[in-house]
Image (cartoon, rainbow, N blue to C red):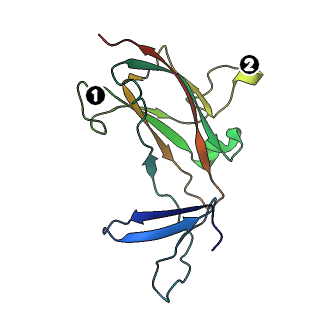
């Protein structure tokens, strides 16, 4: 079976599935309605969180400067397609990672028109500071994918933050 990726994953009932896929097609090769029958295309429901980062220096408080979301879509289309992001900031001196984050929600075109100059404006670029500070020791980025059918691909993020020595 041609595929770009292979993964084993548990479903909501703790049943392990072998998944293979490409850009917008995920196939459960263990699906048993007729032994190796290809299942219908799956969509990504709701929001999804990536693994937390900032572990390289958890003793330091970090201040986000900017974040750019990298997708296979034209940035000006992100808002109309329904993309959205969030950043969960954690202070693990006070909370367990994954519990009680300080969340900053990001909507393309609303939270991202940070500079009207042609080369510096992009609905995929979010700048922080001033009235939108994002500070923490570790961060987790969440993505809400479009709910309409399409070839949507989240390729990654570019992020920039400063570190301040903890006291």
* Label annotation for residue 117: 2
Q: Nearer the viewer, residue 8 or 120?
A: 8
Image coordinates for residue 82, horizontal then vertical, percent: 57, 47
Q: Nearer the viewer, residue 5 or 160?
A: 5
Q: Secondary structure at mark 1?
A: loop
Q: Residue visible at 59% across and 47% down?
A: 154
- Quadrant housing the C terminus: top left
Q: Nearer the viewer, residue 159 or 77?
A: 159
**Dot 1, crowdedness within 10 Å: few (<14), some or many (≥20)?**
some
Q: CA distance from mark 2 to mark 1?
A: 38 Å
Q: Secondary structure at mark 2?
A: loop
* Label annotation for residue 80: none
Q: Residue visible at 37% across and 23% down?
A: 136
Give the residue at mark 1: 92
Image coordinates for residue 31, horizontal then vertical, percent: 47, 79
Image coordinates for residue 133, horizontal then vertical, percent: 44, 19
- What is the residue that sits farthest to the front in this orientation? 56
Q: Residue visible at 69% across and 46% down?
A: 73
């Amino acid at each position: 079976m041609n595929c770009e990726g292979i993964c084993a994953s548990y479903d909501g009932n703790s049943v392990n599935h072998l998944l293979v896929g490409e850009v917008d097609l995920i196939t459960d090769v263990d699906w048993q309605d007729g032994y190796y029958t290809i299942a219908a295309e799956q969509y990504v429901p709701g929001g999804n969180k990536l693994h937390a980062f900032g572990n390289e220096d958890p003793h330091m408080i970090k201040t986000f400067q900017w974040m750019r979301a990298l997708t296979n879509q034209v940035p000006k289309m992100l808002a109309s397609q329904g993309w959205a992001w969030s950043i969960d900031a954690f202070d693990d001196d006070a909370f367990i990672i994954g519990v009680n984050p300080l969340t900053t929600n990001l909507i393309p075109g609303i939270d991202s028109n940070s500079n009207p100059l042609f080369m510096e404006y992009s609905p995929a670029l979010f700048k922080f500071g001033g009235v939108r500070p994002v500070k923490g020791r570790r961060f987790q980025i969440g993505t809400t994918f479009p709910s309409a059918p399409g070839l949507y691909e989240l390729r990654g993020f570019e992020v920039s933050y400063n570190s301040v020595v903890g006291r």
